[in-house]
Structure formats: structure tokens, C-alpha cells
Image (tube, rainbow, N blue to C red):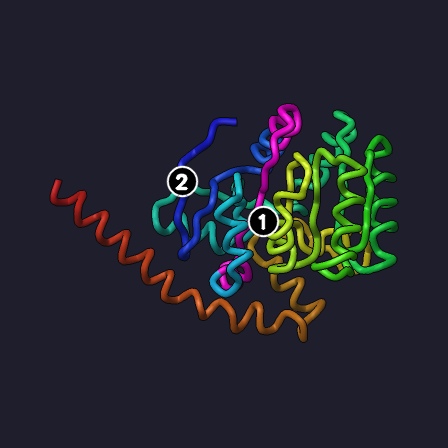
Amino acid sequence: MERKPRLRLLGAEVDAVTPAEVMAFTADCVAARRKAVVANHNSHSLYLVRRDPAMAALYRRADLIEIDSTPMIAWGKLLGAPLSRAHRCTYLDWREDFWRLAAEKRWRVFHLGGAPGAAQPAAAAIRARHPGVFLHARHGFFALQGPENDAVLAEIAAFAPDVLLVGMGMPRQEAWIEQNWARLPDAVMFPIGAAFDFEAGVSKTPPRWAGRLGVEWLARFLHEPRRLFTRYFVEPWSLIPAAAADLGRLWQDRRSAARG
């Protein structure tokens, strides 16, 4: 896949990639046995990445950074960035294409995350839709240091995945990948949050039209208001300085262009 220059939005770097381009990148990396990370940014990650050094390090390492936020795309378009709704990328947007491709190419996929008891129903739901999938799932409740972590890493190494999905929530999943990078196999790694909780039916999956219209956050908030109130109504205020910096940079660029 041809790499494009990264965009800078709200103090972070992101890639203007579509779900199809993410799948093409994944296929290229698996074919080449290349170790890679596909991260994603939304308002929650923009808030956390400024506060968690290990998470920030993972984003600096990431090969692709998806835009998992319709408001971010709208902001980028306002600033003149070459973005459209097609560039909204998250697990729920590309999951069927991913599992179809994984089944077709016989990828070995390891999912780490979710609550005990949720991983297997999620895997069963995926296999029911895509019978050829070669998937191993393990819950994400373990100590991130010491013998438990060593055992998880040994389990992953024994499975030898082509793709590693890490669904332990932000910033835990990003920090875990970064802290264990040298011990992880040559696989394409995706931090995917609570994706398998949706697969298992533990969390309600927002309709995809809500994502396209930019109101998926509202559907999730209505389902879990207590847990998500701070994320959706408090954290975004911290982005005001970064938004002001974007506007200042745009003004400077236009001023320079006017001067010739």
C-alpha cells in the first residue's frame, strides 16, 4: 500500500486511510511476516495519550493510525485536510472484511482481551459468520507484570499469530503492547478496545448508520451513561488548546501563501 503523508489534527498524527486500505496494509504485512501496529485515534485517546507515556510511545511506533472519530474527520475537513466519511476506521467498520480475509487466507488470529467468559462466545459468533477462521481467544484479566504476563506471552508465542488483536481498553492495551514489544511475535497488532464484548453480546453494538452520521457516541452513552459521561462530556474540553493550535497553524499557512 502506498504510504501517504500523515496529517496533524488536535495535537496528534493520523493517517487518512480507509478500511479497505487498512486491510490491504494488513495483508501486505502478513505476507512479508512484518511486525506492525495499527493504532487509532478518537477524542478519548487524544485525552489519554497526553497522560500516559507508554501509550504515547506506542503511537510513535504505530505504522498506521486510523481516525476512529467522525468529529475528527469533520474538524480535519474544516482545516482543509483531504478527508471524507470514507476515512472513518475502526474495528466495527472493517470487522466483516477482516474476518472474511482472515478465513480466505487462513491467517492465525489471536485475540487477547475481554472479561473471563466473554472471549469464547465472541469467538463462536465470529466462527458462525466465517467458518474458516483460525482464531484463538483469551481473556484480558491478568497481571501486566510477572508470571501471569509471562504465561500470556508464552501462549501467544506458541500460537504464532499472523494478527494479534488486543482488546483491553485504552490506555491499558496500548501500554501493554509497547511494554512487551520485544517479546511479541512478528504479527500485525491492533488495539481494538471492547470489540469482542460487542461480538459476545456483552455490550450493545451501535448501528453502523450511527457511526456514519457521527452519533455512535450517543448510542453508546445511552447504553452506559454512568461509565461514559466523563469520556464524552468532560474529556473533550481538554482538546481546546490543540484545536486553537490547529487554527493558528492554518492561519499562518494561509498568511504565508498570500505572501507568495
Could you say whether the residue bearing mark 2 is in a helix, strand or loop?
A: loop
Amino acid found under the numbered disc labelled 1? Arg
Could you say whether the residue bearing mark 1 is in a helix, strand or loop?
A: helix
Residue 241, x across and y down, in percent: 36, 66
- Indicate left or right for 181 with 95 as reference: left
- Indicate left or right for 248 with 206 as reference: left
Task: Please indicate, yes or no, whether residue 209 appears anywhere in the rendered image.
Answer: no
Callout 2 crowding tier (Cα within 10 Å): few <14, some 14–19, many ≥20:
few
**Residue drawn at x 55%, y 56% as measured from the top left:** 55
Q: Is residue 19 above or below residue 191?
A: above
Which residue is more in the foreground, 181 or 123? 181
Asked whether residue 116 is drawn in magenta, I would say: no
Asked whether residue 41 is drawn in magenta, I would say: yes
Quadrant placement of the C terminus: top left
Residue 214, x across and y down, in percent: 55, 55
Q: Are marks 2 and 1 in contact (CB under 8 Å)?
A: no
Amino acid found under the numbered disc labelled 2? Pro
Residue sticking out furthest to the left: 259
**2 vs 1, front mark:** 2
Residue sticking out furthest to the front: 146
Mark seen at residue 82: 2
**Residue drawn at x 47%, y 41% as measured from the top left:** 15
Q: Quadrant of residue 143?
A: bottom right
Which residue is more in the foreground, 20 or 214? 20
Callout 1 crowding tier (Cα within 10 Å): few <14, some 14–19, many ≥20:
some
CA gap between label 2 and label 1 equals: 17 Å
The magenta segment = 26-49
* Pointer 1 residue: 212
**Residue drawn at x 28%, y 52% as measured from the top left:** 250
